[in-house]
Image (cartoon, helix red, strand yellow):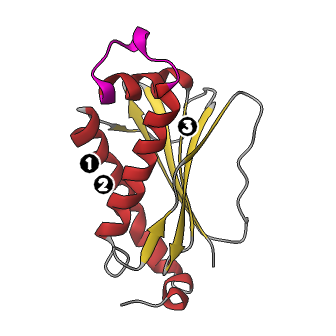
Amino acid sequence: MTSRVAIANTEELHKEWRPVLELATREVFELMLASQLTAVKGLPPTTLNVTAMVGLAGILQGLMGVRCEQKAAALMASRMLGVDIDNVGPEISDAIGEVCNMVAGNFKNKVSGLGDGCMLSPPSVITGDDYVVHSQPENPTLEVTLLLEGMPIVVSLHINT
């Protein structure tokens, strides 16, 4: 099993994790939401006003986040629950929190040594137009931006070293 110190001190390993993070995200959207995500370069102009976060503890310590606009979160809830998008309400937070949790779980199970050596916190969800998510700037951050029916989904892994 890889130690936390070995993971934290291997910057190259973090770069290798970006495709794993993208694959983990794509798989969750395909299996749980029957949705194909498409690649995008950069972040299209939009307001990402919904953020779900899951903490990671153990061998890997950090924070997994999924950010999107309200309409994308509603679409996720609609697909997850099998209901019309106009009929979702407070379930939106539960759905995006669960998507974040599944992406984090799928990611950690794809990285050798993390499956049993890394625990996940329950998800937290923040909504609104007036917030900024901060992480320790000197620590590595992986970020993947994909499109769900033209709407950006930003998945990030902030690694605490």
Question: How far across and down, in percent of the image, does residue 13 sit?
Answer: 44, 78
The answer to whether residue 26 is above or below residue 4 is above
Q: Quadrant of residue 62?
A: bottom right
Question: How far across and down, in percent of the image, does residue 59 sit?
Answer: 48, 81
**Amino acid type of the residue that numbered disc 3 sits on in the rendered structure:** Leu
Q: Quadrant of residue 38?
A: top left
Q: Disc 3 versus disc 2: distance between alpha carbons?
A: 19 Å
Q: Residue at x 47, y 79 (%)?
A: 12
Q: Residue at x 74, y 43 (%)?
A: 132
The answer to which of 28 and 148 lies nearer the viewer is 28
**Amino acid type of the residue that numbered disc 2 sits on in the rendered structure:** Leu
Q: Are marks 3 and 2 in contact (CB under 8 Å)?
A: no
Q: Are marks 1 and 3 in contact (CB under 8 Å)?
A: no
Tell whether position 76 is magenta.
no
Q: Disc 1 versus disc 3: distance between alpha carbons?
A: 21 Å
Crowding at mark 3 (Cα within 10 Å: few <14, some 14-19, many 20+) = some
Q: Residue under label 2, please give it.
A: 23
* Image quadrant in which the C terminus is located: bottom right
Q: Describe the element under mark 3 as helix, strand or loop.
A: loop
Q: Describe the element under mark 1 as helix, strand or loop.
A: helix
Tell me the mark number nearer the camera, choosing from 1 and 3: 1
Q: Residue at x 53, y 79 (%)?
A: 11
Crowding at mark 2 (Cα within 10 Å: few <14, some 14-19, many 20+) = some
Q: Which of the two discs, 3 and 2, labels the residue nearer the N terminus?
A: 2
Q: Which mark is residue 43?
A: 3
Q: Disc 2 versus disc 1: distance between alpha carbons?
A: 6 Å
Question: How far across and down, in percent of the image, does residue 83 sit?
Answer: 31, 16
Q: Residue under label 1, please give it.
A: 27
Q: Quadrant of residue 34?
A: top left
Q: Which residues are magenta?
A: 80-90
The answer to whether residue 98 is above or below residue 157 is above
Tell me the mark number nearer the camera, choosing from 3 and 2: 2
